[in-house]
Image (cartoon, rainbow, N blue to C red):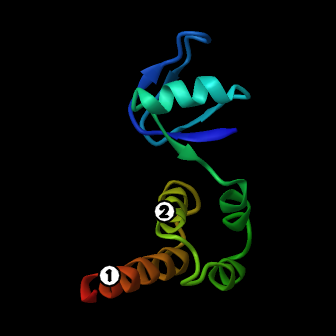
Amino acid sequence: MKYEVKSAFIDKNTKEAYAVGSHFETDSEDRAEFLQKKGFLGSEIDSTVETILDKKASDIIKAISSETSREELESLLKQEIEGKDRVTVKEHIEKLLKGEDDESSEA
């Protein structure tokens, strides 16, 4: 299981340092829950999010739609910025995020 680091920490088991925005991997659900309760980890990263960003920009844009959750969109945007940083992909995700913001403010 893979999680995004929300607050920097040093793993007491491995002595490895984790920076904000990096990824923490563990097979122990209990360990992950403990670190989440302490505020060190965010939710589990969906492996499909990572595979989406491995595609060509045109395929990514087709795969990411308004049906994609806000949390997934934010995660995709952050990973794209830290990774390949493609302008067209970032603009598409930002447009979808802005569209959701506009809809929520009208309610």
The image shows residue 70, relative to residue 20, as above or below, that is: below
**Amino acid type indicated by mark 2:** Glu
Residue hosting label 1: 104
Residue 94: percent from left, percent from top: 42, 77
Q: Which dot marks residue 71?
A: 2
Residue at the image position 60 percent from the left and 10 percent from the top: 13
Q: Residue 91: x and y, percent?
A: 45, 80
Q: Residues within 10 Å of mark 2 (few under 14, many from 20)?
A: few
Q: Which one is in front, 37 or 70? A: 37
Q: Residue at x 49, y 76 (%)?
A: 93
Residue 37: quarter of image: top left
* SS state under label 2: helix
Placement of the N terminus among the 4 image quadrants: top right
Whether 74 is drawn above or below 30: the answer is below
Per the image, label 1 sits on a secondary structure element best described as helix
Q: CA distance from mark 2 to mark 1?
A: 15 Å
Quadrant (top left/top right/bottom left/bottom right) for the C terminus: bottom left
Left or right of residue 5: residue 54:
right
Q: Position of residue 45 (x, y in %)?
A: 61, 49
Placement of 21 over or under 52, stated as above or below:
above
| Mark with earlier residue (2, 1) | 2
Q: Residue furthest front?
A: 107
Could you tell me which residue is drawn at 41 percent across and 77 percent down?
97
Above or below, comparing residue 106 to residue 49 in the picture? below
* Residue drawn at 66 percent across, 65 percent down: 53
Q: Quadrant of residue 33?
A: top right
Looking at the rendering, which quadrant does residue 48 occupy?
bottom right
